[in-house]
Structure formats: structure tokens, C-alpha cells
Image (tube, rainbow, N blue to C red):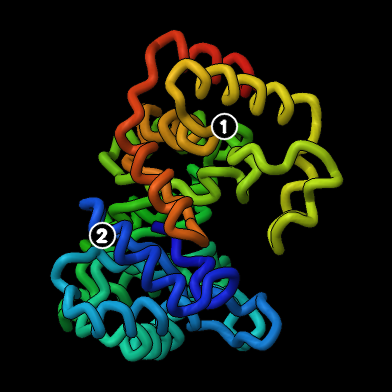
């Protein structure tokens, strides 16, 4: 469950309802970041972590969920920051907001070219040894960056990134398919994809420029409204009709079926959308369905 909407387009009560339904359906991984949702007017970051922390405390279910959060975004320091000093401070802020003793999976949110991998991984090593973080991963690294980080970890006997979080969906395939996916599969890296529904475009609710005002995220999907985007929506409609499934469910099922993907991350702003995400996990696409989708989404 993507937590980027909590405290932004989903208030605390709605977020609680979504999380209750998600966990009640048998799922357990919740993805957030310290920066969610700093971009929203009136927010300063940490809103999503705070809501998730309040929810876990009210439900008494900390041991039933896997908490994933991230560090390194600009939280007012003026740059993307994976320095040891910054990580040591930021983790305490996240632990406090989440109201937990340990983060299950802590991700480097962005590359920080100003900080050596050894410094960042050493900071994580200290957190793991202190029991404040259980595993580490990274988001938004390319193949060269991930390979360099893995080599550093091996050479210096430091914890390695065990999970990658790349942008990946039927439309945005090029940055993960290829060398990066090959590296993750070769090294046994878990992969959890973000923007798995292309910021909501693959739900099918944005089919023309007139639809962009339907949500606060509408402006971010305008570039998908090209010929290729329309081909993908048509393929989703066709496959969905065969299964009695919504476009978003088919799009997520395609990601789930991809070699080299552990699980997609997707957000929901209503309980009904959460139910749709649950259905997507049970949707088995045929080889013919996948061929139709692959062909429509080919660059």
C-alpha cells in the first residue's frame, strides 16, 4: 500500500479505513517516506508517517505490518542528503512519527552524489546493529549506481541494499527493463515498483485533457495522453473485458506477473479503490493477455 496519499488526498480517518481494509484482506506492507507529503500546501513532510503511526497505535497491530519508509529527500536542508549525520537524525524523526522502535525496511530515497556509498552504508550498519532498522534498500538508482553500491557493501563488509524501488508500469518501462532488471535478478534483489499505475493514468479515468481536473494528480499525467498511452488504455480495456476487471486491476496484474518484480506499490484514496487493489492481486493473466499488453506498451 502506497502511503504517499495519506495526509494529502486522504485525511486521517479515510487513511485509517483504507489501511484497515488492506490489512483485513491479508496484506501487510505499507510504503511511505519522511517527505510525504511535503509538496502539499500547508504540509511540511512527515504527515504520512504520522498517520500510519497513529493507525498502528490505535489498532495495536505493529507486529502484523511491514513498515517501509525512506530517507534522503530534501526536508528543508536544501538538497538530497544521504550523509551519515543526516541519516542519524532523520531516522529518529521517522521512528518518532511512526511510533515504532524499528523500521522494517529503510530506503535511500534518491542518489546523493555528494556522499560516498561507504558513508551511507556505514550509517545504515550502525542503525541495524542498534536495532533501529532491520533491512535497507534504495529507490531511483540506475544499474551503474546500484552495482557500485553493491560492490562497496561487499568490499567493505557492510549491509547491502536488499530491495530496489524503481518507477515502473506499463507506460514507464525503459528505466527498469534492461540492465537494471538484469542486475536485480542476478543479485536476488527484491523489487517493489512505484507509480505502478502511472500516477493514476492506468486506472483509465484520464482519457483526454478534459479529464485532467478530476484529481490533484491530474496535471502529472498529461504527458501520458499520447498515441502510445491510448494504445495501452485500449489494451487494458480489452483484457479487462475478458476478466470482468477494471483497467487498474489489469495494469497491476501485469506488473505482478513481470519477471524481476516482487510486488507493485499502489495507492488508494477510498475503500472502494482498496478493494480493487485487492482484486488485482488475485487476477491471473494468460500468456495471450500479457502479449496484448506487452505489444501495446512497447516503446
Residue 209 placement (x, y as % from top left)? 85, 44
**Residue 21 sits in which quadrant?**
bottom left
Dot 2 corresponds to which residue?
A: 23
Residue 188 placement (x, y as % from top left)? 26, 40
> Can see residue 126?
no
Horizontal relation, residue 145 to residue 159: left or right: right
207 and 115: which is toward the camera: 207
Disc 1 crowd rating (10 Å Cα; few below 14, some 14-19, many 20+) is many
Dot 1 corresponds to which residue?
A: 170
Task: Please count the marks in the image.
Answer: 2
Horizontal relation, residue 228 to residue 122: left or right: right
Seen in the picture, residue 196 relative to 269 is either above or below; the reply is above
Distance of mark 1 from mark 2, alpha carbons?
26 Å
Q: Please name the residue shown 57% across and 66% down the image.
A: 113
Q: Label 1's element? A: loop
> Can see residue 173?
yes
Q: Please name the residue shown 30% across and 45% down the image.
A: 190
Seen in the picture, residue 122 relative to 177 is either above or below; the reply is below
Q: Please name the residue shown 54% across and 13% down the image.
A: 292
Q: Please name the residue shown 45% across and 24% down the image.
A: 244
Amino acid at each position: 500500500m502506497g502511503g504517499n496519499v495519506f495526509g494529502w488526498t486522504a485525511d486521517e480517518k479515510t487513511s485509517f479505513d483504507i489501511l484497515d481494509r488492506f490489512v483485513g484482506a491479508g496484506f501487510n506492507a505499507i510504503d511511505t517516506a519522511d517527505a510525504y507529503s511535503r509538496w502539499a500546501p500547508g504540509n511540511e513532510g512527515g504527515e504520512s508517517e504520522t498517520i500510519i503511526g497513529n493507525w498502528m497505535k490505535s489498532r495495536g497491530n505493529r507486529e502484523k505490518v511491514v513498515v517501509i519508509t525512506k530517507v534522503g529527500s530534501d526536508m528543508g536542508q536544501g538538497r538530497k542528503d544521504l550523509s551519515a549525520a543526516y541519516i542519524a537524525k532523520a531516522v529518529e524523526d521517522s521512528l518518532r512519527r511512526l511510533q515504532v522502535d524499528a523500521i522494517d525496511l529503510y530506503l535511500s530515497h534518491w542518489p546523493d552524489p555528494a556522499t560516498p556509498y561507504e558513508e551511507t552504508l556505514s550509517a545504515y550498519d550502525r542503525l541495524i546493529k542498534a536495532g533501529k532498522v532491520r533491512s535497507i534498500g534504495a529507490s531511483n538508482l540506475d544499474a551503474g549506481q546500484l552495482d557500485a553500491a553493491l560492490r562497496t557493501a561487499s568490499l567493505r563488509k557492510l549491509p547491502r541494499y536488499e530491495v530496489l524501488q524503481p518507477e515502473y508500469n506499463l507506460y514507464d518501462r525503459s528505466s527498469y527493463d534492461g540492465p537494471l532488471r538484469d542486475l536485480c535478478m542476478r543479485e536476488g534483489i527484491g523489487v517493489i515498483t512505484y507509480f505502478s499505475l502511472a500516477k493514476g493514468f492506468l486506472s483509465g479515468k484520464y482519457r483526454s485533457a478534459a479529464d485532467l481536473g478530476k484529481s490533484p494528480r491530474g496535471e502529472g499525467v498529461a504527458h501520458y495522453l499520447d498515441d502510445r498511452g491510448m494504445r495501452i488504455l485500449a489494451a487494458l480495456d480489452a483484457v479487462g473485458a475478458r476478466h470482468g476487471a477494471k483497467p487498474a486491476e489489469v495494469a497491476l496484474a501485469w506488473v505482478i506477473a513481470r519477471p524481476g518484480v516482487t510486488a507493485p506499490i499502489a495507492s488508494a484514496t477510498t475503500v472502494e479503490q482498496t478493494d480493487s487493489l485487492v482484486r488485482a492481486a488475485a487476477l491471473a493473466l494468460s500468456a495471450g493477455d500479457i502479449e496484448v499488453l506487452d505489444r501495446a506498451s512497447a516503446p
